[in-house]
Image (spheres, rainbow, N blue to C red):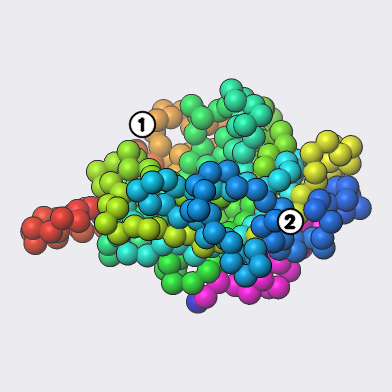
Amino acid sequence: MAGASFPAFLAAFVAAAAAACLSPAAAGEPLPRTPPGTPLSFREGYTQLFGDSNVALHGDGTRVHITLDQRTGAGFASQGAYLHGLFSARIKLPADHTAGVVVAFYMSNGDVYERTHDELDFEFLGNVRGREWRVQTNVYGNGSTAAGREERYGLWFDPTEDFHRYGILWTRDRIVFYVDETPIREVVRTESMGAQFPSKPMSLYATIWDGSSWATSGGRYKVDYKYAPYVAEFADLALHGCAAGRRACDEEPVAAAMPPAQRSAMEAFRARYMTYGYCYDRLRYPAPLPECTVGPEAAAFLPSGDARAAAAASHRRGRRHRTRGGADSAV
């Protein structure tokens, strides 16, 4: 299935935002001054970070291509910072051999709070030819990178064939990651998390870069620049948040719970497509982090936090490639 149309996805997101009391009346006039969730052109809402000519605008600035080649990667960021909101983009990833390539779509305030930064990430991790991209989500609060809250997943579609929408809903008491209209992860603020729940204004970023040291099989497969340039395409970049510094941002009511139908969709996705969960990683965390609720589903994961089914499939692929003498091993 191709990426969800913007109106359908927007309807789901605006409903979630309304439930979270992020409407203009509740959260202050959203900036920039556009209807909630309306896509902005690059010049209206964003600024280039790095990559000189590797950031290219198309369609009057409504679409952005960022490129990784042997010279450099590329990136851009929102012009303003936001305290809570709804942030999304339609993204199409590079095809073919993309081992070592990382495309990131994320919120961060690391430029302001170097040692106590907050961060909410979608990281797309490239792979060897014939193997699918992986998606990783990260949640860091108050510089808590040592206690990483990472999860990884497969997808039910090929993200290189068409655009798909990826979104982050961030309120004062919960965070939800979306792929198209499906919520794939929810983080609910608990008292035990304290400052490790992101709570300071953040900007929106998009980057592409060389992650050869870790992104594919722990760094076993590097970026091969004979396949460059690697181009990630962004469209319909949507900002719907409370601009940092507005008093109304501090008066945001507690968000409503996720509707049952969305929760069922999220649980089905996680049961089928999650390949790593930090709550199940007993090697890294002998005692689960305090917000983790671990039930019978833990039996589906190895002590490393990797899903047993994904690990078994990777092992079978690796054995098959070794038998054939191929270069692409388990990934």
> Which contiguous range is marked in magenta?
2-20
Q: Quadrant of residue 253?
A: top right
Residue 51 visible within the image:
yes
Is disc 1 placed on a helix, strand or loop? loop
The overriding secondary structure of the stretch rendered in magenta is helix
> Label 2 crowding class (10 Å Cα cut-off): few <14, some 14-19, many 20+?
few
Left or right of 274: which side holds 14? right
Tell me what residue is drawn at x 28 percent, y 65 percent. 130
Q: Amino acid at mark 2?
A: Glu
Give the mark nearer the N terminus: 1 vs 2: 2
Q: Is residue 15 above or below residue 144?
A: below
Q: Residue furthest right?
A: 25
Q: Residue at x 62, y 31 (%)?
A: 111
Q: Which residue is mark 1?
A: 283
Depicted 17 relative to depicted 141: above or below: below
Left or right side of 317 for 254? right
Instruction: Name above or below for residue 115 compared with residue 321.
Output: above
Taking the spot 23% from the left edge, 53% from the top edge, the residue there is: 330
Residue 12 appears left or right of 101: right
Displayed quadrant of residue 247: top right
Read off the residue under disc 2. 44
